[in-house]
Image (cartoon, rainbow, N blue to C red):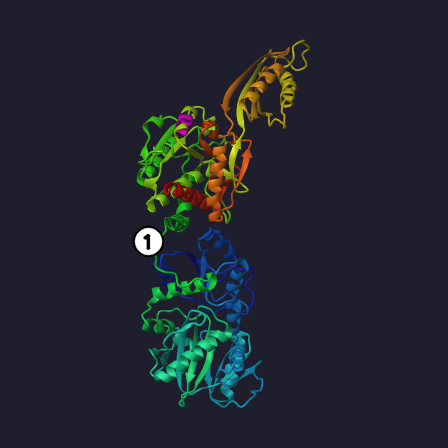
Amino acid sequence: MKIAVVYNRESRNVINLFGAPNKEKIGLKTIQRVVNALRQGGHQVTTIEGDKDLVDALEHFMPRVVKGERPGMVFNVSYGIQGQARYTHVPSILEMVGVPYVASGPLAHSLSLDKVVTKMILRQHGLPTPDFAVLDTPDAPLNGDLRYPLIVKPKNEAVSFGLKIVHDETELREAAAVIYKEYRQAVLAEQYIEGREINVGLLGNGPPEALPPVELLFGDGPQIYTYEDKTQKSGRSIGHACPAPVGEKLLARARELAIQAFTTIGCADCARVDMRLDADGNFYILEINSLPSLGEHGSYLIGAAHVGMDFVAVMNRLVEVASARYFGTPEPPVFDKRTLDPSERVLRYITQRRDEVEKRLQDWTAHTSHTVDPVGIREAVRRCDQNFGKIGLKPIGDLTDERAVWGWQTGKGFADGTLLIGHLDVPVDAEIAPQLFRREPEWLYGDGIGSSRAPLVMLETALRALRQAQALRRLNLGVLLYTDEGRDARYSADLIHQAAGRAKRVLILRPGRVGDSVVTQRRGQRNYRLRIRGESLRPGQVTRQTEPLRWLWDRLEALCKLSDRRKRLSVSVVDVRTERLPMLLPHRVTASIVLTYPDAALAEELDRQMRTVLDKRGPRWELDQVSDRPPMKERRGTLRLARALASVAGEWEIPIRNESSVWPSVAGLVPARTACLCGIGPVARDLGTPQEAVQRISLIQRTLLLAQYLLQEAEG
């Protein structure tokens, strides 16, 4: 599980420093111990300051989850930055944005931090607590039947801030004045209970488990636990006795009262209840600490240690009880990987490596292999060959031409099995500079990240998951990667067609589109180059010859009118370039024209119509077909394949839908007898632009979908 340890130390990253500042700080040593303990428990852990950037930081660290994967959790040790009810600030934010967290919620924190309200609630439920009075000002009258000595402390503070014993009116007024000035709040005056101090830690819920009570041994000096004691500034060392030597009957009574106080205030997961025990064996609840200290010498951990729980065990147990509270599950069992269901092993492999997957994607985007970069492409091929070799795939000699196509397969080969086809080149305009990887809460950006890199990482991760589940060796599976997508696959087309003919089904690793789609049919696309040559004319020159650019402008308009929406035919002009001599009009003009079509016969007819439009009196012209990418036609095998994939997607609650596309792919090269599905890569947007991006959740969803589908194939 991803766990963010949220704390407060810097306390500066706010809009304004305004209101009563928090004086309570958690130690860096304690934070690091928590992090190390959670990592030993197998969790992915980071630390985040609980300030105004908390939500953004959490979104980056723990994006949305897939079915079967628990969402990330916050291990909350934040005391707040400023203002009232500071313990509630981070939990309130987490409640609002829907992030689970360890420890009590805002209400319990607010109640326990207000010592007066806590005491009133305890009394309403018949729980013993010392008599008290509240001084709203330092000179307010002391009401009630209180007798000196008294304990005075701030009404809404923790860690013994301002705590002091007073023995008379003068000491009371002096202490109250200091508290009122220092903490800007009312003063709680409480009857001092002569006796022993007992702390009881609680762990769990419904009801919690009471840890063995711990007695604080004060030695010389005041028989109370002061702030100076806790910060080791008092000059004395506070000892501990666990379990408190008070006899079994009183130990049981202390546990009972602690559990009742925990439940009454509505705490969750953990707390510490501080009590005093008088000479007559009566307990008095002093306060409830809804965020008990995790310092290595604190009574909470001392009580846990007595029942055999070291620091690592306590921290991970807190995560377990919080998980049970949120997700309704019992204590998570310790899984033996050998006994896990293969689909569960695949799920765990993928979801537990989210950071690794994104890091691998970042590494791939940092490696440039644009279509026009042979050196970069060669390095990308070497990297893939190395990765697939480690996974257990072998090169396919007759499907590798060392120029534009490389193939690998499992030991069983891929004949009558599954062939996965993707491309290694990044087909972007050479004038667009490579884009650096960057992460946002919902999207990942980078060079070729959607068109090439995310499908590659998806493929690698799915195959690694299948290998870890011991399913890869049972698969009839091949991988074919080509490197001329930016050249319309003109050099790789024959080998792609040949390889696809051997397989029973082909999955094309093109990106899915926004809307969670896969593609069951695509139009074909022809690219033409129209070149016009004429005489060089001066501006304003009178001649019977038509200027090449004006002639072309007229013809292009006529060509575009050949588009037919009903027949799903379109003719579009994508580029026009001119050549001219100084001070003369253009004498050569070149236009790039794109024709999209659903059927080859319609494309041939449209080709003839285009030449008829051009075959009129005017300058010399040439119309050359530069490339032709055949359409992907919807077929029965494709629809069966789409239904099979949708069935797996439904089982794992992965959104997916079928659609057709006007853009071509190598899916059009797959023989008609072979089932083919395109666009199974992660959902991407803005392909070929500086804003090209892949959806973060889709990267995990589509990886899981591919792996689980192939797992079903392996299991027959």
Q: Which residue is mark 1?
A: 339
The quadrant the C terminus occupies is: top left
Q: Counting other residues with Cα less than 10 Å from the Cα at mark 1, is it few (<14), some (14-19), or many (20 or more)?
A: few
Residue 392 in the image: above or below residue 77: above
- Residue 202: image quadrant is bottom left
Residues 561 and 673: in front is 673
Decide whether residue 4 is among the magenta residues.
no
The quadrant the N terminus occupies is: bottom left
Residues 379 and 156: in front is 379
Residue 441 in the image: above or below residue 189: above
Q: Position of residue 28 (x, y in %)?
A: 39, 63
Q: Which residues are magenta?
A: 495-500
Q: Is residue 413 visible?
A: yes
Q: Position of residue 296 (x, y in %)?
A: 35, 69
Q: Could you tell me the amino acid type at mark 1?
A: Thr
Q: Is residue 679 visible?
A: no
At a point 52% along the width and 65% down the height, the residue shown is: 89
Main secondary structure type of the part rendered in magenta: helix
Residues 370 and 612: in front is 612
Q: Position of residue 370 (x, y in %)?
A: 44, 31
- Residue 612 shown left or right of residue 279 in the figure: right
